[in-house]
Image (spheres, coloured by chain):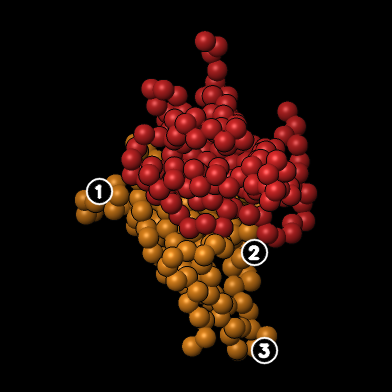
Chain colours: A red, B orange
Amino acid sequence: MTARTDVEQVELANTTFYEAMERGDLDALTALWLADEDGISCVHPGWPVLSGRAEVLRSYALIMANTEYIQFFLTDVAVSVSGDTALVTCTENILSGGPAEESGELGPLVGQLVVATNVFRRTGDGWRVWSHHGSPVLTETDEEEDEEPSS
Amino acid sequence: MTARTDVEQVELANTTFYEAMERGDLDALTALWLADEDGISCVHPGWPVLSGRAEVLRSYALIMANTEYIQFFLTDVAVSVSGDTALVTCTENILSGGPAEESGELGPLVGQLVVATNVFRRTGDGWRVWSHHGSPVLTETDEEEDEEPSS
């Protein structure tokens, strides 16, 4: 096992989270959320708060059932670690398509700009998602917000 | 000092955060955010991510300058504490008004439904805000969320 810094581990957990969504892999996604039954929470863009494993995982099953294709281009990924908790903010540049109207055809692709705050907790099995909050970016800003994470 | 459980302390810190906003008290709000220069982050409804104390506090100064009146009716407050970190989710039922068009007159009041995920960290001076993420609720839910501001 390669020794990784906390920040690297958290960034990897964050990437893995979005990859599970891209693959529509509900089992992988389920494993990434904290086993804590009640304490977890999730806000999808424009949605109210969902709390607890049952409600959160049901929402992902629903979203996956209605999403034929989804891809996340993550930018502005910032990680802040304190003890056994980590805070990740990132911009999700999403390209997605719903189920086809006619069989075999992909629905029209839609681009969406979402910002997310993801909170992770360190467990014996690695970093797990405690909270995900995604929201649509609606306002215009002066600054270009698509700065590349130049490092 | 009254002995309070962690959950009670965090709930109080969360309430204090919104009360500082209601009073337009930037100093109180500044004191409530973690002193951590870089690690803090903030997403106002519809905004991109703001990072670091300077950027976050500037945004509050701007919002306060453009807000004549704001009141938060918090509902669905849920607190989850793990070690020195706490996660709060709540619904912010906001009633606000911009500066008056004519002097002495309050601008029209607007109702807004926002959900927030607030992350706090325990410090020697009490619980401080590490991250605030607020987002508009856009979807229809079973519950009525369209209280008419016409009264």
What amino acid type should be assigned to the residue bearing mark 1? Thr
The chain identifier of the residue carrying mark 1 reads B
Residue at 25% in and 48% down: B5
Q: Residue B62 shows which numbered tag?
A: 2
Closest to the observer: A126 or B145? B145
Q: Residue tagged by mark 1?
A: B5
**Secondary structure beneath label 1:** loop
The image shows residue A58 at horizontal and vertical percentages of 44, 45
* Residue type beneath disc 3: Glu
* Left or right position of B42 against B87: right
The reply to whether the C-beta atoms of the residues labelled 3 and 1 are less than 8 Å apart is no
* Along the line of sight, the residue nearer the viewer: A81 or A1: A1
Residue most extreme to the front = A103
User: Is B49 on the left-hand or right-hand side of A86?
Assistant: right
Place of residue B26 in the rendered image (x, y in percent of width and height, measured from the top left): 54, 62
At label 2, the amino acid type is Leu
Q: Are marks 2 and 1 on the same chain?
A: yes
Snapshot quadrant of residue A124: top left
A23 is higher (above) or lower (below) than A118: above
Q: Is residue B138 above or below residue A116?
A: below
Q: Which residue is mark 3?
A: B102
In the image, what residue occupies the spot 45% across and 34% down? Answer: A30
The residue lying at 54 percent from left, 62 percent from top is: B139
